[in-house]
Amino acid sequence: MINKIPQHLISELLEKTDIINFISSRISVKKKGKNYYALCPFHQEKTPSFIVNQKKQFYYCFGCNAHGNVIDFLMNYEHLNFVESIETLSILHKYNILYYKTNPTNTNNAYEKRNKLFSLMKTITDIYKQNITTNKNNEAYIYLINRGLNPQIINEFSIGFAPKEWNYISKNITINKTNQQELIDSGILIENNQGYTYDRFRNRIIFPIKDNFGRISGFGARNLNNNKPKYINSPETSIFHKSKQLYGFYEMKKKYSRPNKLLIVEGYIDVITLVQFNIFYAVASLGTSITSEHIQLLFRTTNNIIYCYDGDQSGTKAAWRTLKISLPYITDGKSIKFVFLPHNEDPDTIIRQEGKIAFENRINQATDLSIFFFKKLLHNIDLSSIEDRSYLSAKAIPLINLIPGETMRIYLKQILGNKLGIPDINQLETLFFKYKKIKENKNITPIKQTKMRILIALLIQNPHLVAVIPSIKILKKVQVKGLTLFIQLVETCIKHKTLNTGQILELYRNTHELTILVKLATWDHMITDNQVKNVFLDILTNIYNSILETRHNFLINKERKIGLNNNEKYELWSINKKLAKT
């Protein structure tokens, strides 16, 4: 057995988190009646089919079947696992996650491990940082000053230095079996085949990398000797994921909750220098190419992304790769642009040469997606050649079809049509239809109406109805399909009287009942709000009467055949009395 987060803590976090406020801070929602509607963030669509209900604290998309409470939204929208989602809500509401142990001898849980790693990373950061702050003659400090960084910015980004020693960390931390494994897990130490450990980072400037909450999750490290590799990062760990994190993102969020634009650069020092020049909207990938996770994070933060690359061939190649990865996330209202710097220049060097105003003029004159898109595709293309025009259409159309934003898609189609010599949009559409992938039909199977399904649906959608339910003892004596689940729900609602739909479904996470409960929770049963209580009681009464009639008939038959004892006679009299009232 493993340690678990107490269910009451999860319920409290859900109770404190209003799903409307939470989701509307990330996507645009509009109220219509008792629900809020939005374009689904989990699939491409033109008409809003994503519904959020405040009363139920639950969301559902009729287009792609995405559904859940705030925890599910975090898991799917932020690409977090369950523990990370709970951790995010805990930090939001300033809770401490306390596990209970299903097995007293088991001390293993993901949250405690992550917390220990975060604490360890902070300790390591302080050790590396001290090498710079306490020794101004340190070669790393001199290097940074010569690069133009001032002491304040060095301190703000907690920049440090790892000396040449192979065992520097073990000299500064008492090593035992527990923290040695943590140091290995965090990537600070490397264990060789013989079981010996040594420092990963040696003779390198250390750039601590913070997560969205400002916790040190990993390091970037630059070699002082310009030997290869010039930069290395922490390896992938439970708290560090290069494909999902951006350097400087936490610092940027401290300045802007919703920046008008974000500039994506390639280096740690690029970000630091731009901040020193009071450009606070720059972030960098962690020595890797831009990923789809990066792009989704960026578009969750701003509508305008500007990628900055060297203007040489490798920079253009990297920009084209980034453009192709970005296309599926360009919905209407979102844009990407490109800044290409002079060869062998980067933001750090160019802003020192030109100054802030000239550098920001470069940003303001960034190349639009459409211009770069066709400039790249038209390279070595002869538009007077039918074969080349055919090649152009074969390359461009599949890429344009990736764009979910209708306005941008139409605009690029028009440009392509003019270049192909097909100004008639209807003729051009036949080409797009030829290349367009046939979308999977996601038909929603209608739910067959039964009394028990309606009863469960009404209860899970309106948990307060538990207050009008009489004793359920009689229900436990019979076997009717769905009745066991209904009784479970009744007992749950009685035990937790203030639960909403989202909290109830959370209790059934990872159970086989969850699928049907989600369907019933989102089922439009066509019963108006003012009739819900009456219909619920009518169905429940019919089920009770059906049970009584079945028992009544059994007792009558028994009386005729062998007779009844006194208790059974009294039971029959009671049933007759109850049935007479109906």
Image (tube, helix red, strand yellow):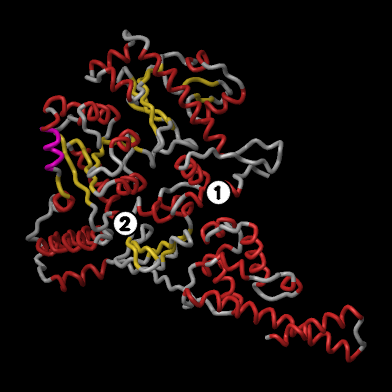
SS category of the residue bearing label 1: helix
Judging depth in this view, the residue of 471 and 506 nearest the camera is 471
Q: Which of the 4 quarters of the picture holds residue 229? A: top left
Q: Is residue 334 left or right of residue 411?
A: right
Q: What amino acid type should be assigned to the residue bearing mark 1?
A: Ile
Q: Is residue 141 above or below residue 412?
A: above
Q: Position of residue 180 (x, y in %)?
A: 57, 24
The type of residue carrying mark 2 is Ser
Please give the residue where the numbered disc 2 appears in the rendered image.
Answer: 28
Q: Which residue is mark 1?
A: 10
- Residue 268 falls in which quadrant of the image? top left
Q: Is residue 170 left or right of residue 227?
A: right
- Alpha carbons under labels 2 and 1: distance apart: 26 Å
Which residue shows up at 56% across the image and 68% down it?
516
Q: Which mark is residue 486?
A: none
Residue 395: % across, % down = 22, 58
Quadrant (top left, top right, bottom left, bottom right) of the C terminus: bottom right
Q: Is residue 58 magenta?
A: no
- Of mark 2 and mark 1, the one earlier in the sequence is 1
Q: Residue at x 59, y 44 (%)?
A: 5
- Provide residue 467's location: percent of width, then percent of height: 61, 66
The magenta segment is 358-365
Q: Residue furthest bottom?
A: 560
**Where residue 380 sits in the image (x, y, percent)?**
13, 51
Instruction: Name the residue at 62% across, 37% down.
Output: 108
Crowding around mark 2 (Cα neighbors within 10 Å: few <14, some 14 to 19, many 20+) is few
Q: Seen in the image, is 166 located left or right of residue 325?
A: right
| Viewer-side residue, 152 vs 269 | 152
In the displayed structure, 458 sits above or below 242; it is: below
Between residue 518 and residue 555, name the one nearer to us: 555
